[in-house]
Image: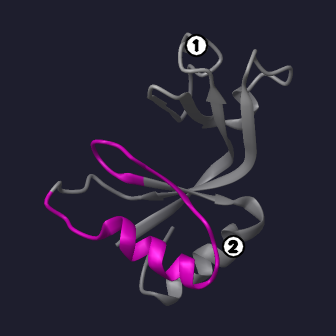
Amino acid sequence: MKLKREEGGYSVCRLDPGASFPAWASSGFVSATRTEAELSIVCESALVPREGAPGMKEEGGWGMIRVIGPLDFGLVGVISSIAKPLADYRISIFSISTFDTDYFLVKEEKIALALDVLRRFGFEVQ
């Protein structure tokens, strides 16, 4: 399986569940999930307003690894094949799946180690 380290830094933001979708999360990589409890936005850190938004929490300092896709919906174990070796090295991830592929956020201070671990487990990293 081929992986690519995406450029830039990323943030995970939590807004109140009834919050409007923020205009600042409108370019580059953006993933949004609304539940009864929250509106979560993942985007490039540079897009997040420094003054925040009412009720917003931000966790920055993430780097991104993308599985080069598209991936077939019938594939089994893609996320676990990446998550397990990283967990064995105590590297936490935040995973996001889209129609075509999977993305993994890893804290910047651990991303070089994560990529090294994944190479050792047979992943091709671009």
Decide which of 24, 14 is in the foreground and name it. Answer: 14
Q: Quadrant of residue 56?
A: top right
Rendered residue at 58%/13% (across/down): 19
Residue carrying label 1: 19
Q: Is there CB contact under 8 Å for labels 1 and 2?
A: no
Q: Establish if 15 lies above or below 64.
A: above
Q: Residue 8 location, x and y as percent? A: 69, 46
Residue 126 inside the magenta-drawn segment? no
Task: Decide if residue 99 is on the left or right side of residue 73.
Answer: right
Q: Image check: 112 left or right of 64?
A: right
Q: Is residue 83 above or below residue 100?
A: below
Q: Quadrant of the N terminus?
A: bottom left
Q: Which residues are magenta?
A: 74-102
Q: Residue at x 56, y 85 (%)?
A: 88
Three-letter residue code for mark 2:
Ala
Under tag 1, what secondary structure?
loop
Measure how far apart labels 1 and 2 are at the Cα level. 35 Å
Is residue 46 or residue 95 the one in the foreground? 95
Q: Residue at x 79, y 21 (%)?
A: 52
Check residue 112 in the rendering and tell me which mark sits there, or answer none. Answer: 2
Q: Position of residue 12 (x, y in %)?
A: 64, 40
Mark closest to the chain's N terminus, 1 or 2: 1
Q: Quadrant of residue 43?
A: top right
- The residue furthest right is 51
Which corner quadrant of the image does residue 47 belong to?
top right
Binning the other alpha carbons within 10 Å of mark 2 as few (below 14), some (14 to 19) or many (20 upward) gives some
Q: Is residue 107 above or below residue 32?
A: below
Viewer-side label of 1, 2: 1
Q: Secondary structure at mark 2?
A: helix
> Residue drawn at (55%, 10%), measured in percent from left and top?
20
The residue carrying pointer 1 sits among few (fewer than 14), some (14 to 19) or many (20 or more) residues within 10 Å by Cα, namely some
Q: Where's residue 76, x and y in %?
A: 21, 68
